[in-house]
Image: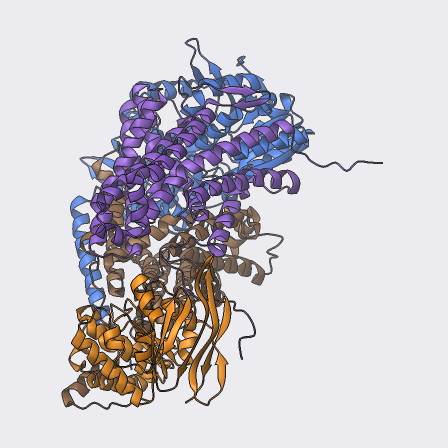
Chain colours: A brown, B orange, C blue, D purple
Amino acid sequence: MPEFDLLGFLIQWLTIFGLYSILAITLNLEAGFAGLTNFGKVVFYGIGAYVGATLTTYLTLHLNNVDPFEYPPYSIDGIVKLIELGGKSPPLSIGLLALSLIIAFIAAGSVGFLLTYPILRVGPAFVGFTLLSFGELMRVFLRHYEPVGGSKGLAAIPRPFSWVGDPKLSGFLFLLLVLGLVAFTYITMDRLTNSPIGRVFRAVRDDEIAALCLGKHVPRIKALTLFIGSGFSGMAGALMAYYFTSVNPDMFVPAVTFNVWAMVILGGMGNFTGSIIGVALFTLVDRLLAFITPTLGVTAISPDYIRWMFVGLLIVIVLLFMPKGLLAERPLKTPAADEARKLLAEGVGSAQHT
Amino acid sequence: MPNILEVRDLAKYFGGVRALDGVTISVPEKSIVGLIGPNGSGKTTLFNVVTGFYEPTRGEVLLRDDDGSVERIDGLNPNEVFLKGVVRTFQVPRLFTSLTVLENVLVTPPVQIGERVLDAPFKSRWEKQERELARKAVGLLKRFGMGDYVYSRVTELSVAHIKLLETIRGLMTSATLYLLDEPAAGVDYGVARELFNYIRGLREEGLTFFIVEHRLDVLMDYVDYVYVLHNGKLLSEGKPSEVVNDPKVIEAYIGG
Amino acid sequence: MVSKSIPIQLIYLIVGVLIGLAAGYGVFSITAPPPGEAPVGEGRTYTIGFTLPLSGELSSIGKIWEKVTRLAIEDLNNEVKAYGLNVTFNYEILDDETKDDKALQNVQTFAQKGIKVVVGPAASSQVKVVKAFADENKIVIISPSSTSPTLALKGDFIFRTVGSDAGQAKALATLAYQEGARKVIVFHRNDEYGRAFADFFINYFKDFGGTAASQPYQTGLADYAAEVSALAARVQSEGFDAVVLVSFDTDGANILSHAAESAILSGVRWFVSEGPHGASELLTQSVGEFAAKVRLYGTRPLFIANPLYAEFKDKLKEKFGLEPAVFCENLYDAVKLAGWAIIRAGSYDGDAIAGALVEVAKTYYGPSGWTMFDEAGDKAMQDYGVWAIVKTAEGKYEFRDVGVYERGSIVFIEEAY
Amino acid sequence: MRRLKMPQVPWDVLSSLTVMVVQYSLLYMIFAVPLTLSYRTTKVINFVHSNFVTYGAYAAILLNGLYGNRNMLLAAALAFTVSGGIAVLNNVAVFRPLDKKGAKPVALMISSMGLWIFYKYLLYTIIDLATYFSRINFVSYPKIVYEWIPSLSLGSVKLSSSFIATSLSAAAMIAGLYALLEKTNLGRAMRAVSDNPTLSEISGIPRHMVVNLTWLIAGGIAGVGGVLWTSYAGSITPEAGDSMILQIFTVGFIGGLSSLTRTCIGAVLVASIENYGITLLNQFFGVETSYKPFLTFITLITTLVVSPPLGAGGGLPYKLFRRAGRSA
């Protein structure tokens, strides 16, 4: 008698949790710390996914001496070839993974960097709308762009660990990779924000005009933030392509962005741990709902609509009654406070200025 | 005494509105110069043009460097003007509300290793500099009597301290010219005098101040020279005592 | 130096995750329904998983499918009882929102519960996302409606109880050519379904000796008036004698409604794919009159004059008051096949069930006709019927199947217009 | 001499296309003018605006589907009440409390996004229930044919009854708003609040009442727009408002979210670019009509880059490309 597959559940949940965590942490860097209301998060996720998918499929074919232009990976012949060839050689799989991650970072980051230009001209409240509409523009473009499959998208993307054989083990290895990337993202962002540049991020968020008048190159800081945030989102996107083994334009709808926003707002703007908790709660509830809803037997209304209504209300309620979220923003941690405390305790102050 | 700042025939039109129309002003080094005028006379627009918010429609803004060379700064961006050594404050104070007083001051210094993105994640690279800056900042805060507020949020400060803090932020750099937009607005008389005493003290140390102020009772006791703007044009200029008695000024203030 | 706080935060995180897990597992173990296979008394109970588009783009069809599912499971259980087998089938329906990631999540959920047979998902893009997981974990996926040619792959766990678009495109091309169209414009959805269908259609139509051009339109718009207007401009300036519409239900209904107001488009013939069939919005007076004027015919996967289909249609009407929408009969047969394959397999194991499914399908005949699979696991013999919108005696409009595609030509069994 | 064969846009296509462009212009006007109106008074970037349209449309649809109503005035009255009511409710329950707590405009926008999601799925749930009980498919509903409204034929040009209704409504809206804003005390108060909220409060204008009234009017007009939509669109889905949100905002942005006149010009511009643009591109350059959203997005992004909405929370005073020759 088959039992509940707890291990499978954990692997699957934590993988999704990991992918969303990267998005939430970077969104928190952009929106929570630097004040960029990025409603186009899905753009960078999508770019990463397409970069990962395109590189892996084309190169898998090419390096196995199949001409990817004769058997394009979006055609049935290409897919048959990909299933035949993909995921057989460990060094090739790992190499493609590494390459995809790097290129996805650069590609998504660069687009983020360039998108700073239109949003400089509009006030903070309009940044969201500009990026949102760019996301839709990207989707229309992808549907028409044949080399990445157009409306078909790309399928049968070889997974990086499928050479292991056992699906559980390869899933576990992939999970470790995802969680490793989450840890890397978390530590990088945590260190970035608890440093002088983190102080500048917060200053720009609080008052970008004052920051500009204090000599901070605000456009560069915004571009940098979007570059970093988008780059990491791109890496999450590349991993997502491997996880789903298929990408198509309609995966990258604004709903993804809104989900991430709800997670970040619930967890607390300006607190990365909060974001992770927000993601964990959301993804876990989603998973549990999948187990619970069939037993309710409700067919007149869709539980999914109720879930989204709840998400919408949650955003409003958190903003109204708990604007800081579950975990409030923590004060900046740099050695300055510590040094100041020492000085004040000693009662010595050197009044030097040049 | 050479001029640190010269504004020559400066004009700024917004559509048909002539916010500034041919203004010429010079601010000598190590002086306190006042700029007064009724509401809407173009004082803040002048500051905004000098600090790079707006490009002037006509005219030029010249700034003298440390080494004595003169440079045009109109058309530069605000952050670039700041890096040339011009600090401004705002009529409505603009502090970073989520940061502590100490951190507000620490944002200012321009060349921080920890603000470079590749160095920021590695604390060891910037910790030494950060500690040095912190010592300097605490020193400054103590000197202006704000030693007790080092860890306070700026939202907890009094209006006077907020005004003071905006000025102190500038002192973390080697800036030499301060443009203060109504430093004494909303501050009671005693505190306002205290603030201007500090300004006078800083002037002795070699700084230059160019101040927009409505509270003439305080201002006139401290400035060396006053310009009066009216409808975007210079109405009068001179020593405080001369200006106060200028009939044109009196008429503009009462009639305007 | 690493900031000391990071490990502490990570520990918090890990502890939090573990607590969450424990809570989740607790909740689950209380609410968990019986797993895929459980002995009940002396008999056995099997659960078949369903991932259906109850919300999202295909929701209007998905809602009807849900009813069909319930009907099919009931019939299956009665049939099994009649054979004297002590087996009961349960079903679990999950909504996949017509979204790819949700479909995968649903299949994973079923897998974690030990369910090895899943019916659905609806769209080809969803099937693609599910495929790798299904193959690796040996979950049998039976999609009643995925028609993309890029999923015709051998030796996988994906089965489709509907013929590929290629077959229908040929039937539609035959219909159009036989009805006298020589120069047609294919107005189609700009998605995988629309593009593939249009390509097939154009190839077949050219083989017959006609000429065809294509005009894709963007999906997900609020209204298609501008697209229809551009179509009219092309029809007028290039002199097409027929329009072939390849669409889903909502967009198809919208387009036909606007076309009904255009003098140009009312002057050419219209041929339609299976998508709009069954859409209640088409049964309005203006579209009905338009259909009669342009002698609108559509094709759809159907084995016409099939008593089982008639019976199925009546049962659905009687039980739920519904007309079958597109692919309902394919879904019904998918459920039946899944049930019999589980019984035949002998062991509850993906490989065995997949093998048994192929065997069962060879001898099964249902509302959708013969269900035999080809080597790629797709329906080998799909029959196509011709539908039309006809006026009833009461002055209302209804869909009626008026012809059949047989041995390379269309045979009309009824005069529609 | 052989004549080069150029595809041409035939005259009757052009005339019906023009009728369509005019209709879309008027519809976009009715959708976008209230957006501008509400933004300039309240400074909230209101995503719920697309819900106003959809709820208006579904008020008419449910009235038609469940009770067989074919009277457009009744539908419009209900739609005005529903959408206007939602707008006022939003303000009272969410925007004003947030504003009182000193939330930034960005927080208001995010909360409107949350409300948008909420209302969208609330409508889906309502429709699900209505479908469940009435067995009528409300998820995709055919165009409603209203009674009493005539259609006209001017030669070969046919003006549908929907076109007549839309023109009359647009004219009524413009006249009504003009009279309201220019001739009444309330209108002057609305303009005063939008010019300077703090000052107007000091000078004794009941700001909250004015803001609530603005929301009522803005939501209500958008809701009536939804009713007009049900008489025009080939079929209506609960995504109707959302699929037009980018067009509506583009129109609003062209108007700088401040000028009603410019918003109307924006409506004409967007409707023309979309419809003439894609037909011409399709006819003469063979561009597939599925590229149509591209045109809208490019219009939007061009507007944001070239002429960002003024007073829109202040862009950065930063000049990426400066005049050359700055050193003295």
Residue C416 place in picture, x, y as percent: 52, 14
Closer to us: B4 or B154: B4
Tell me: residue C77, above or below residue C411. below
Q: How many marks?
A: 0
Please give the name of the residue rendered at 31% of the width and 66% of the height, measured from the top-left corner: B253
Image side of residue A280 versus residue D249, left or right? left
Please give the name of the residue rendered at 49% of the width and 87% of the height, measured from the top-left corner: B69
Residue C121 shows in the view: no
Residue A258 shows in the view: yes
Q: Quadrant of the C terminus of chain C?
A: top right
Residue B245 place in picture, x, y as percent: 31, 75
Tell me: residue C13, above or below residue D73. below
Q: Quadrant of residue A235?
A: bottom left
Q: Residue furthest right?
A: D1
Image side of residue C10 versus residue A141, left or right? left
Tell me: residue B84, above or below residue C224. below
Image side of residue B219 versus residue D178, left or right? left
Closer to us: D73 or C206: D73
